[in-house]
Amino acid sequence: MANEAKVTEGLIKKFAFLEGKIRVARDRRIFVETPYDKFEEVFKYALNNGFPLLCTITGLDEVQAFGFLYHIAGIDGTVLTIKTNIPKDAAKLKSIMPYFPNAEIYEREIEDLLGVEVEGLSKGKRYPLPDDWPEGEYPLRKDWKPKEGKGKVGGQNA
């Protein structure tokens, strides 16, 4: 766990506000939580300090806010997950495509499934929902209910 301690110490030394916001779950798995207004600084620092690979982005409906987990990895297999939240009434995030062009697919999922606008994401085909999916219907929101005929799989609600 020497590498995890080094990463943790580096993050806290650079960003004192992260004290108590970093958790090492096990070997090569580090989680950090940052406010959204500090996210880009923490994210860029991580990219420049051993985490040059994007694994995925996970979007969550946390009832009062949306949560986003950016899973980035080092060449040694260590994964750093940076979590941030945005309020539901300001559902807008900045794209990370300038850093990772492959983020496009994850950011399209965030727009399509959660209804969060991703600034800087070019207009394109919907993903993963079909083109005829009703506008304003976001199936990963906890308060979403399928309309008749939509969101059903094999006669069952999805």
Image: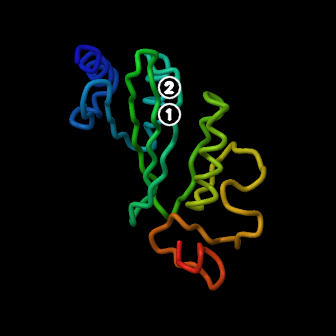
Q: Which is more toward the observer, 89 or 77?
A: 77
Residue 72 lies, with reference to residue 134, above or below; the image says above
Which residue sits at x=44%, y=61%?
A: 61
- Distance (Cα) linking label 2 and label 1: 6 Å
Mark 2: secondary structure: helix
Quarter of the figure with the N terminus = top left
Query: How crowded is the residue under tag 2: few (<14 C-alpha within 10 Å), some, or many (20+)?
Result: few
Query: How crowded is the residue under tag 1: few (<14 C-alpha within 10 Å), some, or many (20+)?
Result: some
Name the residue beneath numbered marker 2: 44
Residue 125 lies, with reference to residue 52, above or below; the image says below
Q: Quadrant of residue 3?
A: top left
Residue 115 percent location from the top left of the image: 60, 61
Residue 103 percent location from the top left of the image: 62, 37
Q: Which is more toward the observer, 74 or 49?
A: 74
User: Is there a contact, CB below 8 Å, between mark 2 and mark 1?
Assistant: yes
Residue 50 lies, with reference to residue 91, above or below; the image says above
Residue sitting farthest toward the front: 154
Question: How many marks can you see?
Answer: 2
The answer to whether residue 88 is left or right of residue 115 is left
Residue 58 percent location from the top left of the image: 48, 47
Q: Amino acid at mark 2?
A: Lys
Which residue sits at x=52%, y=20%?
A: 52
Name the mark on residue 25. Answer: none
Q: Quadrant of residue 136?
A: bottom right
Residue 47 percent location from the top left of the image: 49, 22
Which residue sits at x=58%, y=60%?
A: 113
Mark 1: secondary structure: helix
Residue sitting farthest toward the bottom: 148
Q: Which is more toward the observer, 148 or 8?
A: 148
Which residue sits at x=44%, y=23%?
A: 46
Name the residue beneath numbered marker 1: 40
Q: Amino acid at mark 1?
A: Glu
